[in-house]
Image (cartoon, rainbow, N blue to C red):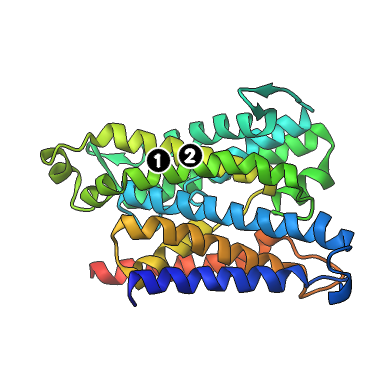
Amino acid sequence: MRKRTAIYFVLAGLVVASIISLFLGPVFVPPQYILKSEILWQIRIPRVLLSALVGMMLGLSGVMLQGILRNPLADPYILGVSSGAGVGAATALALKLNFVFLGMSSVPILAFIFAIIAVLVVYRLSYVSDRSSPEALILGGVAVSAFASAILALIIIVSGQLQSIYFWLLGSLSMASYVDVATLIPYLSIGLVVAYFHSKELNVLLLGEDMALTMGVEVSKIRFLMIVTATLMTAAAVSVSGLIGFVGLIVPHFVRLTIGPNHRSLIPMSALGGALLMVVADSIGRTVFTPVEMPIGIVMALVGAPFFLYILKKRRLGKK
């Protein structure tokens, strides 16, 4: 499929899915009451906008991490970034911290700090004989995620806020607001600019670290910038939506199969694809068991976990 056609196709799908999602839910809004409907303007529109933004940020984070690590299994959730951000956000919620620094509230700040610690630990653990090993990277991510889960459980027990924090950890957009939408836009803008203007370096990194160095790419600098930017976007997304996994794994993989590995096209397509996937997943989560809502984190786990195993098996067969 041609790249421009693919972008138009995904964009059209996102618009259609968003319009349909506005009319899904336990309460039907008749067309003649659309302009006056509080449910539509105060609940469903911000929810659709927020799900699209979160999807774009997670999809973009996934393609950046996969690019610099040269590993299609890299994903903010699998590498422990989301779990680390979850610990930071849960800490802010449990301690009822409420401060603003450089325009950022306490929740995304702590989420970012803990996420960057988690990803740096995983990244360091992945080094075997001075080179990053994909298998060690995944094992490190699993270990850090398990440790973060234990910390989260401890926070829940000590704080006594079992229901609120646990429901938040499952991932949900039910409390979406225009404030959340406005909060995420700067993070997404930074991520898009950084990723797109370094797409050439990401393409060169596909040739290998040694080749990239000989072609003048400052590998360590680019890798650090991409990790920090992807972590910042993931932390911001987690702070408003809870833990939602596998978006950054599924979307870049499908996009790469469709239009190839060129990051100049891969980056915008992964962002749009992430938005489309999240809007559809959120619509499914709040309609399948109406009036009971299924957290979007569960929807994505049901889809993403088998997909992860499929890619893992495919890679192992490819090595034989």
Residue 284 in view: no
Q: What residue lies at 76% left-to-right and 48% top-to-bottom? A: 177
Query: How many dots with numbers?
Result: 2
Residue 253 % position (x, y)? 40, 65
Relative to residue 167, is residue 114 drawn left or right? left
Q: Amino acid at mark 2?
A: Ile
Relative to residue 24, is residue 312 drawn left or right? left
The disc placed on residue 238 is: none
SS at mark 1 in the image: helix
Quadrant where the C terminus lies?
A: bottom left
Question: Do the residues under discs 1 and 2 have CB atoms within 8 angstroms?
Answer: yes
Q: Which residue is mark 2?
A: 190
In which image quadrant can residue 291 be found?
Answer: bottom right
The disc placed on residue 194 is: 1
Nearest the camera: 109 or 245?
109
Q: Amino acid at mark 1?
A: Val
Quadrant where the N terminus lies?
A: bottom left
Does 242 appear above or below 274?
Answer: above
Relative to residue 259, is residue 252 drawn left or right? right
Q: What residue lies at 54% left-to-right and 36% top-to-bottom? A: 115
Residue 229 % position (x, y)? 45, 38
Local packing at callout 1 (Cα closer than 10 Å; few below 14, some 14-19, many 20+) is some
Local packing at callout 2 (Cα closer than 10 Å; few below 14, some 14-19, many 20+) is some
SS at mark 2 in the image: helix
